[in-house]
Amino acid sequence: MLDTPDAVMAALRENDTRPYGRPRTVTAEELVDAAEQFDDTGVRSLALLELMEAYQYDGERSKSPVVFARVLKLWDTDPDGFGEWAREQVFWRFKWVASSLLGTPDVPLEAIRRWHSEMRDRYRAAGFGLQPYYAQRFHLAAHTGVGTEDAYELWTARPRTELSDCHACEIRSRAAHHVRAGDDARALVAWRPVLGGQSTCSEEPYLSHASALLPMLREGRLDEARSSHLVGYRFVRGKAGMARPVGQHIEFCALSGNEPRGLEILSENRDLFTLTGDPGGRLDFLTGVEVLIAALARQGHGDLAVSGPPGSGWTVDTLLAHLRSEAGALADRFDARNGTDAVGARRRARLEREPLLAEPLALGVRSAAAPELAGAPAVVPAPRRATEPEPEDFAALVVRARELDLVGHPDADRLWRRIAERFEADGYVHEEGTAAGTAGRLRAELAEQRAHAALDRDDHTGGKAELLAAADLFEQEGLLGQALMVRTRTLVVELGEVDGVASDWPALDEALGRARELHAAGGMSDDDYLIVLQCRAFAAHHDLVAALPEPPAELVARFGEVVGAYRTESVALGSPKRAATARQYAADAAARQGRMAEAAAELREVMAQLDAAELPWQTPRVLGLLGQVLLQSGESAQAVEVFHRALAEAARWGDDSYPFAPTYMMLGHASAHTGDEGAAIRALSEAAARFDRKGRAAAEEAAQVRLQLADLLRGNGRAADAVAVLESVLLDAAAPELDERLLAQVRLDLARGLFELEEYRDAAEEYLRLADEVEEWEDGSTLTVVACEASLALARADRWEAADASRERALAAHAEAPQWDQMAATLRDFARLVMREQGPDGLESALARLAEADAVGAAAEQAGASYNSWFLRGGSHYERARCLAVAGRYEEALAEVERAVPVYEEGGEQAESPRAEAVRLAALIEGTDLGRTKAATDRLTAAIARCRSVGLPEAAEILADLRERIAASEG
C-alpha cells in the first residue's frame, strides 16, 4: 500500500534497483501518481526525477521535458523541499532536456535556443559555470551543421565545472567531432583514456566502443575493432535506450563482412523498431540497419527472410523499401526543422560507404543467422595468381580438366563445375567420338566429382553413395580400371569418420590383386593403380594411429610394407605427387610416435621433391603437416612461419579443399606459445569462422576453438571479450547437440568470466544451471567445484539464502567427491564475505564457516588425502584473525594470526608470500588497533629483511610503507 510518504519512498528505492526497461518505467509512472496525494515536495520531486530517469534510459527521451517542467514548477515553488541530491539533479537535468529537445524534430529550433537561454540564466543565478551551456550550444551546431567549429572552440576552451558531463562522455563528444571532420586518427587518440579504461562511467566505454568501430576499421586497427564490438555490444544488447549504438554495431558488421552477425543483432533487437520516443536515436538505428540490408540487396539476397518491425514477415527487399521510406522521411523532418541538409547528408554518407575490408573480419563469435551467407565473403578478394583458362571447346575443356586432375591442380574443380553446368544444361547434346569420350564416361566422372564435393563437406555417407554410383557408371562403359579405383576408395572413405567402420583388409587385398592384373594388361591407368595403393596406405595409417601409443608389431610391419610399396611404385611410375603423399604418411606416423626430427626431415625432403617436380600447389598440405611437427617439437616460432606459408600458398592456389580451419587453429596455438597473443587471438578467431562455414557438421570443432579463444582472451585480461565469445556458443541453435562435457566447460568458463566482470547475478545463474546439468555425472567432483563457485557468486550477488543452500550442496557433494583445497578455500572466502556484508554481527556465522574449513582439513588428514596442508591450516588462522579484527576482538585476532605464521613456514619458499601477508596483518592489528607501535615496527623490520632475502621486493616495499605509517602515528 502506497498510503504514506515513507511507503512511496521505499517503493522508489526498490524501483531504483531494477534494470531500465518497461517494467521500471510503468512503476515510476505509478509512483508519481502515488506521490501526488501528499503535500511533500521531497517525495514528489524524487518521484518525478525517477520517472524522468526511466524515460531517459527506456527509449522515451521525448517525454522527459514534460516531466522536468513539473520538477521546475516544484522547484520554483518550494526549493527548500528538495533534498541535496534532488537539488543537484535539477541543474544536471537541464542537459537531458536540451538533448531530448534536439532529438525531436517536432520541436522548433527557436524553442531549443530558448531552453539553452533558460539553462544559462539559471546556472548563472545559482553560481554555476557555463561550460555545460556551451556544450549544449556545440551539440546544436554539430547537429545542424552551422557554426560547428566556433561552437566547439567556445565549449572546449572553458574549464570543466561540477555540472559538466563526465570526463568520459566529454571525450566521446570530442572524438565524435573529429570523426565528423574526417580525422579518425585524431579521434582515436582522443578516445584512448576511455577505450583504455582509465576514464569510465555508467555508459562508458561502451558507447565509445560503438562510435569508434568504423574509425578503427578505417585506420586498420582490426584487433581493437573486434574487441570493441564484442565488449560494446554486450552492454547495449536488448536495451531500449540504446538504439543508436545498436545501429552502429549493425553497420560495423555490414562494413566488416559480417552480415550474418549483423542479422543476428537485428533479430535480438527487433523491438527497437517499435520505439518512437527517441527520434534521433531511432534515425541512427534505422540507418545502421539500412546499411546492412542494402548491402545484402546488392549481393542478390533480396528474397532472404530477415527480422523487421514486429507484426509481419520481412525479406531484404521489403525491409529495405520500408527503411528507405521511414528513415528518409524522419531525416527530412529533422532537416526541415533545422533549415539545413546536415542530418540527411550524414545519413546519405553512411549509406554510400563501401565495405572497408577485402575479406571478412573474424570476430570470434558464433553467428547462427542466415547460414547461407556464411559461405563466402561479401567482397571477393582479388585473385593472387592467374587462374587456369576455360577452353571454349567442350572436348578441350574436358581434356584439360582431366589433365589438371592428374597432377592435383586445384583449378580442376572449377573446370569440372563448368563441365557439369554445360553437360546438364537444357538442350545439351553430347558429341560422340571426340576427346571428351562418351556421355556415359562423363556421367561417371561427374558423379565422382560430386563425391569429392560431398567429402569436402564432411558428408562421408553421401560421398560414398556417389562413389558407388560412379563405379557402376564406369563399369557400364567398360572402364573397369576406373571402376575398380573408385570402388576401392569406398572401402576407406568412412574410416575414422563413421563409427563402427573398420579396415576391410580382405577386400583391400582383393582390390590390389585385381588392380595388378588390370594394370599389367593395360586396362588401368598408372594413376588409378596408384590410387588403389594409396587407399591401402590410408587404411594402414588409420590402423596404426588407432592403435597408438603401443601398436602391435603386425600393424607396424603392415604399415611399413604398404606405404613402402606405394612410394616405390609411385617413383617407378613417375608420379612425384603420389610419392610425396606416401612420404607424408611416413612422416605423420613418425611424428605421432614421437620421432619429430625424422618427421621434419622427411617433410622437408618432400617439399624439395615437389619443388623439383614443379607441383607448387601440392605444398600447402606438406607445410601444414611440417608446422604441426615443429609445434609439437617446441619450435613454435618456426611453426608460425610454416603455417603462414601453408595458408598463403593454399589461398594463392585457390585450394578450397585445404583444411584452413584446423591450420588457423594450430597457427593460433603456435602464436600463443611464442607469446604473440594478438596473433593467436586473430588466428583462433579466423579458425572459428572457418569452422562455422562448414555448418553444423563442424559445430563441435568451432565450439572447441572458441573455448580456447576465450581462455586466451581471459588470460590476456580481456574477460568481456571472452564472455561474448562463450555466450555466442551457448546461444547457438546447435549448442544442445554438443558433447555434454564440452558444453559444461563452456558454461563453467562463462560463469567464471562473468564473475571476473563482477556480473555476479548472471554468473550465479550459469553456475546453478551447470550444477543441475552435472549433478547426475558419475564423477561428482565437477559438482563439488561448481557448487563451491556458485555459493560465492550468490553471496557476491547478495542472494544469501541461495548462497547458503549452494554451500550446503557443495559440502554434500564434497562428502561424495572430495575437493579438499577448493572446499576449504570456499568456506574461508564465504566467511570473509559474511563479515563484509554483516560486519561484527556476522562473526558467529563467519567463525562457523571457518570451523567447517578446519573440519575439511582434519578429514583430509585422516583420509591420508593429497592436499595442501600448510595453506589450508594457515589460511584458516589468517581468515579467523581478519574476522575477529573486524569484530573488534583484537587480542584474539593477533593471537590467531600469530598462529598462521609458523604454519605458513611449513610450506617453505612457496609460502613466503602468504607468510609476509600474515605478518602485515599482525603488525596492523598490533600497531594500529592495540597501539603497540614498537612491537609492530620490530615485527615489520624482521619481516622486511626476510622478504628481501627470499626475493620478494614488492612485499618488502608494502611492509616498509606500513612500518613508516605506524611509526609516524606514534609521533
Image (spheres, rainbow, N blue to C red):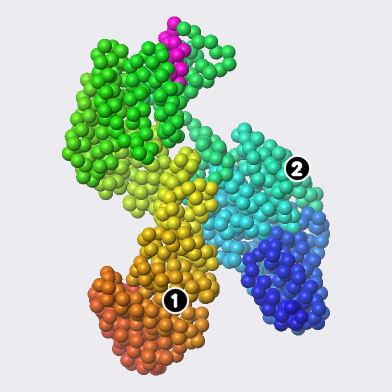
**What label sits on residue 325 in the rendered view?**
2
Q: Quadrant of residue 664?
A: top left
* Rendered-image quadrant of the C terminus: bottom left
Q: Which amino acid lies under the numbered mark 1 shown in the image of this protein?
A: Phe
**Residue under the point 44% across and 76% down:** 830
Q: Residues within 10 Å of mark 1 (few under 14, many from 20)?
A: many
Q: Is there CB contact under 8 Å for labels 1 and 2?
A: no
**Residue under the point 39% across and 20% down:** 471
Position above or below: 376 against 403: below
- Nearer the observer, 447 or 239: 447
Residue under numbered circle 1: 830
Which range of residues does the magenta coloring cover? 433-446
Res 709 seen here? no
- Which label lies toward us, 1 or 2? 1
Disc 1 is placed on an element classified as helix
- Nearer the observer, 578 or 666: 578
Q: Whole-percent x and y of residue 52?
A: 73, 68
Left or right placement of residue 705 versus residue 369 in this view = left
Q: Whole-percent x and y of residue 730?
A: 51, 53
Res 406 seen here? yes
**Disc 1 to disc 2, how far (Cα)?**
58 Å
As for residue 436 lying within the magenta part, the answer is yes
* Rendered-image quadrant of the N terminus: bottom right
Q: Residues within 10 Å of mark 2 (few under 14, many from 20)?
A: few
Q: Whole-percent x and y of residue 234?
A: 56, 57
Q: Which amino acid lies under the numbered mark 2 shown in the image of this protein?
A: Ser
